[in-house]
Amino acid sequence: MIRRILLAVDDSPTALKAARLAVALAAATRAELRVLHAVEDHVLTDAVGRVSTARDVARRREVSAENVLRVVSELARDAGVTARTTLRGGGPVECVLAEARSWEADLVVVGIPDDARPGAAAAVIEFADQPVLVVPGRRPPGGPSG
């Protein structure tokens, strides 16, 4: 039985696709939904801050992450699903695995963007203690239609 669904999101279109599926699944099963966004450690933020004229890059990344979580919360609310959001700092794989274990998720939902290697999703699949539903981006050219 699925009682708790952990959805990992970033700012990709595939994450939005995964969010829609996770929300629909939560609504159909009356499961709790937790939405996680991991903000990678500050190496990238520091590097961008050094070469950019933009001020407060770290705060901008945080606001972007908060916006992603807000959009998914609104999708859930519109479907009658209560979603709790979590923003964590660190590597996405480590954050997803830690959250899934500590919250005792029954299912983890992740998306794989079209331009991404499946490395992070593969690591979540390999090391998660619960089933992982992977939502792909677009269908490959010439792939089956549905």
Image (cartoon, grey):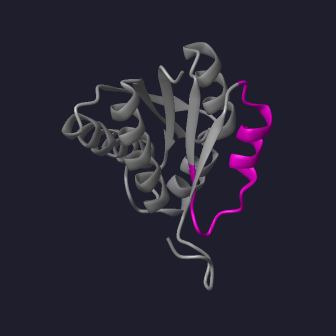
Q: Is 114 colored magenta in this rendering? A: yes
Q: Position of residue 61 (x, y in %)?
A: 42, 47
Query: Looking at the picture, does residue 54 appear above or below residue 89?
Result: below
Nearest the viewer among 11 and 89 is: 11
Q: Position of residue 73 (x, y in %)?
A: 29, 36
| 109 to the left or right of 132 | left
Q: Is residue 146 visible?
A: yes
Query: Looking at the picture, does residue 94 appear above or below residue 137?
Result: above
* Residue interval drawn in magenta: 111-129
Q: How many marks?
A: 0
Q: Is residue 91 visible?
A: no
| Residue found at the far bottom of this picture | 142
Nearest the viewer among 68 and 133 is: 133
Q: Is 73 colored magenta in this rendering? A: no
Please tell me which residue is depicted at 47% across the width and 50% down the height of the picture: 18
Nearest the viewer among 53 and 110 is: 110
Please tell me which residue is depicted at 69% across the width and 32% down the height of the picture: 94
Q: Position of residue 39 (x, y in %)?
A: 53, 40
